[in-house]
Amino acid sequence: MGGESTTHTAPRSGGSGTGPAGSRTGERLSGLAVALGLVLFLGGFAWGAVVYRPYTVPTGSMTPTIDAGDRILAQRVDGGAVRRGDVVVFKEAAWGDAPMVKRVVAVGGDTVSCCQDGKLKVNGKEIDEPYLPEGEPAEITDFSTVTVPKGRLFLLGDERGTSLDSTAHLTDAANGTVARSAVDARVDAVVYPMNGMLPRPTGFEQLGALSSPGPLRTITAAVIAGALLVLGGGAYGPIAKRGGAARARRASPEPTGAR
């Protein structure tokens, strides 16, 4: 008894409370992924809240592009940035007290008339409008040429048969046009139902450059990437512990005398 000596072998991990260098590096990377993910996720939402405004469209005057009850996201823009083909949210006292959603078909200095061959004509050029309901003409009732005053816009709904738009106010002092300053935002996408980004109004390209889409796709990508990083980083700990326990069981020597 008294002459026996006992030899103790230090744990391979280097002592209690410490782990392999690889696991410590993994934990650091996991924490970094979670932190970066939170920045992207929360930053994306904050960016979206600053740039965009949500609206619910009350009528079907923009059908089939936007139906009654659809939820849209509209980028906050200055009215001076609006171009032909844009779908805008505006408020005009002479048209009513509520915000309205219409499409800009002519800007200050343009001439607009309808209809020849069932098409809208702007600055003497016929405009192809694929967003209109299939088989319907550009206008139900013809109107003579209107010259849009500087700093104003001529707006129409995509459902021309029911839309109360510029054609319903042609006898007003401004010939149915609306001031650019009345525009609050430019519609980028229909988010409910998830119809996505509005199609480009390519029929107006022959008259000048179109507006560029807002940063909605970038914001959405940032939010999704952030969520994935948070989930992935948070899952590392449990997965690493489970893997470490499995490796420890495989590495443990069989007890002496076991059969």
Image (cartoon, rainbow, N blue to C red):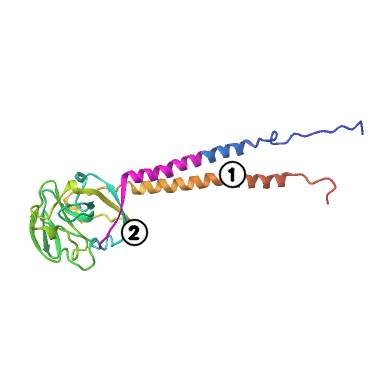
Residue 209: in sight, yes or no? Answer: no
Q: Position of residue 197 (x, y in %)?
A: 32, 54
Instruction: Give percent across and percent down for residue 163.
Output: 19, 62
Residue shown at 59%/44% (left/top)? Answer: 237
Task: Give 159 or 215, whichever is nearer the viewer.
Answer: 159
Is-magenta flag for residue 65?
no
Q: CA distance from mark 1 to mark 2?
A: 38 Å
Query: Quadrant of the rendered structure where residue 132 is?
Result: bottom left
Residue bearing the label numbered 2: 195
Numbered disc total: 2
Upstream in the sequence, badge 1 or badge 2? 2
Q: Position of residue 216 (x, y in %)?
A: 34, 48
Q: Residue at x 19, y 44 (%)?
A: 80
Q: Main secondary structure of the magenta part?
A: helix
Callout 1 secondary element: helix
Disc 2 residue crowd, few under 14, some 14–19, many 20+, Cα 10 Å: some
**Quadrant of image for the N terminus:** top right
For residue 237, which numbered disc appears in the image? 1
What residue is shown at x 65% (from left), y 44% (from top)? 244
Please name whichever residue, 123 or 221, is drawn nearer the observer in this view of the structure: 221
Q: Is residue 38 left or right of residue 60?
A: right
Mark 2 secondary-structure assignment: loop
| Kind of residue indicated by mark 1 | Gly
Q: Position of residue 5 (x, y in %)?
A: 87, 32
Image point 12% across, 48% down: which residue? 108
Q: Is residue 141 left or right of residue 252?
A: left
Residue interval drawn in magenta: 32-59
Nearer-the-camera pick, 192 or 58: 58
